[in-house]
């Protein structure tokens, strides 16, 4: 049961992190700033904004305000790994309900999940 509690907490933390990243602070933006950049600068900004999964406006705002921008490469990988762990746990649950298994060694699952949990906590601490 302890593993289920850890999984539930990490999934909640993960979605809170995604909500923070998408919301990004002040929503009533009433002021507009126009700026000129070279073509090379523009391409760099567009590339970095795409890599961070942010709009150009959001990326430039965060950069100008000295906010740390977390790239989503880690999140995508973590989401994939969490999905795999979840699928495995669901399969084990089905087998347990069918009476086909009585006891399972979840040591490797705990280790994998613990590593993901640590990475997610580091990302959230950097964001906060």
Image (tube, rainbow, N blue to C red):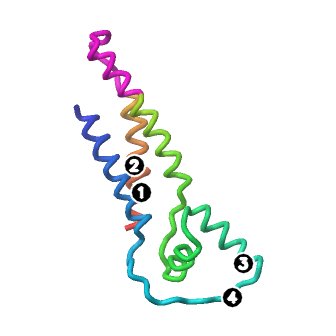
Contact between marks 4 and 2 (CB within 8 A): the answer is no
Secondary element at image label 2:
helix
With 105 as the anchor, is 66 left or right in this view? right
Earlier residue among tags 2 and 3: 3
Number of other residues with Cα within 10 Å of mark 4, as a class: few under 14, some 14 to 19, many 20 or more: few
Alpha carbon separation for disc pair 4 and 2: 41 Å
Give the residue displayed 38% in from the left and 82% down from the top: 28
Above or below, 76 relative to 44: above
Q: Nearer the viewer, mark 3 or mark 4?
A: 4
Residue 51 position, x and y percent, is 61, 61
Residue position for label 3: 41
Contact between marks 2 and 1 (CB within 8 A): the answer is yes
What stretch of residues is rendered in magenta? 88-106
Alpha carbon separation for disc pair 2 and 3: 35 Å
* Picture quadrant of residue 92: top left
Secondary element at image label 4:
loop
Please tell me whether residue 39 belongs to the stretch shown in magenta.
no
Residue position for label 1: 122
Residue position for label 2: 118
Which residue appears farthest toward the right when viewing the image? 39
Alpha carbon separation for disc pair 1 and 4: 36 Å
Q: Nearer the viewer, mark 2 or mark 3?
A: 3
Contact between marks 1 and 4 (CB within 8 A): the answer is no
Question: Which one is in front, 25 or 123?
Answer: 25
């Amino acid at each position: 049961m302890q593993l289920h509690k850890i999984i539930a907490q990490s999934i909640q933390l993960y979605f809170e992190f995604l909500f923070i990243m998408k919301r990004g602070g002040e929503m009533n933006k009433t002021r507009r700033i126009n700026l000129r950049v070279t073509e090379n600068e523009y391409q760099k900004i567009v590339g970095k904004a795409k890599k961070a999964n942010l709009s150009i406006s959001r990326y430039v705002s965060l950069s100008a305000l000295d906010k740390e921008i977390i790239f989503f490469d880690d999140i995508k990988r973590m989401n994939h790994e969490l999905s795999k762990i979840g699928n495995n746990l669901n399969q084990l649950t089905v087998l347990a309900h069918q009476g086909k298994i009585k006891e399972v060694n979840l040591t490797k699952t705990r280790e994998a999940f613990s590593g993901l949990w640590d990475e997610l906590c580091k990302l959230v601490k950097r964001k906060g």
